[in-house]
Image (tube, rainbow, N blue to C red):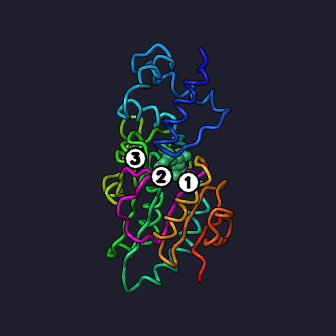
Amino acid sequence: MSISASEFDYVRRLVLDQSAIVLEDDKHYLVESRLLPLARREGFDSIASLVAWLGPRKFDGLQRKVVEAMTTNETSFFRDFHPFEALRKSILPELMTKRAYAKELNFWSAACSSGQEPYSLAMVLQEYFPSLADWSVRIVATELSADMLARAREGLYSQLEVNRGLPAMLLVKHFRQRGTDWQIREDLRRRVEFQILNLAEAWPLLPPMDIVLMRNVLIYFGLDTKKKILGRVRQLLKPDGFLFLGGAETTFNLDDAFERVQFDRTICYRVRKA
Ligand SMILES: C[S@@+](CC[C@H](N)C(=O)[O-])C[C@H]1O[C@@H](n2cnc3c(N)ncnc32)[C@H](O)[C@@H]1O
């Protein structure tokens, strides 16, 4: 039961309009595999009948579910490892020296999926920088998908998820077992401020950021959207702040006001000095 060209086109346009995610011509299989289970759950016998029902209606709950179903939410604790090492060993000690008077640090995990990234950061801060206890530290974590954000807020992970990248010592210390799952302890959950944010639309007021983790999301967007978003990140970053992108992402040829900075085995970006 394969999807027709016009159905694919409808989904592609909806997803582009609402999330800026670009579905290339060869993504028919992806649309089918993601939308058929959704169509069935919602009581339709096929993607064709789901699209026929959605077509004339204005953007609402079910369209939102279609867009969310087309997001890729792959993530893990301490994903790629080296960025967290760079933060722990080099970047944070230096930033803390610079901010010793203001005692304020702001972090943004943009497109945080189910929350492993901001919680990894919160664990690094708690484990290695106890002196931050009397600082004003904000970890803002944002995401397009309401479902993912609800999961992130709950902080409940399967055994499989905690087996990916999370050291046993941190599991024991920061999680509580709930049946076969593990939930982040309340004190750590309270350290992260979660909110809905579509990177392609107007952003709510955010504080000037010391560190922005915007990893593995720009890859889904077209050139103009990437440029627009990087330009806005540049405005938000403090002059000596750092931006982390995913391993397959770069600012190169998109926003040359950023320069690459290498820390051991990871690369991040800061705004070039004028
Ligand atoms: C692959 S995950 C990356 C998660 C995490 N940053 C990491 O690197 O592990 C990409 C996330 O981007 C989100 N996303 C996609 N389009 C978005 C948009 N327009 N605004 C905000 N988030 C978006 C998806 O919902 C998904 O959770």
Residue 200, numbered circle:
2
**Looking at the picture, which amino acid does disc 3 mark?**
Ala
Quarter of image, res 114 = top left
Q: Earlier in the sequence, mark 1 or mark 3?
A: 3
Quarter of the image where the C terminus is located: bottom right
102 vs 245: above or below: below
**Looking at the picture, which amino acid does disc 1 mark?**
Thr
Quarter of image, res 23 = top right
Q: Earlier in the sequence, mark 3 or mark 2?
A: 3
Residue count near mark 2 (Cα–Cα under 10 Å), binned few <14, some 14–19, many ≥20: some
Residue shown at 35% from the left, 63% from the top: 205
Judge depth for marks 3 and 2 and give the one in front: 2
Name the residue that disc number 1 marks.
Answer: 225
Percent across and percent down for residue 267 are 65, 66
Q: Is mark 2 within 8 Å of ligand 1?
A: yes
237 vs 68: above or below: below
Quarter of the image where the N terminus is located: top right
CA separation, marks 1 and 2?
7 Å
Give the residues drawn in magenta, as a range. 196-219
Residue shown at 61% from the left, 72% from the top: 257
Residue count near mark 1 (Cα–Cα under 10 Å), binned few <14, some 14–19, many ≥20: some
Secondary structure beneath dot 1 equals helix
User: Are the residues tagged 1 and 2 within 8 Å (C-beta)?
Assistant: yes
**Looking at the picture, which amino acid does disc 2 mark?**
Ala
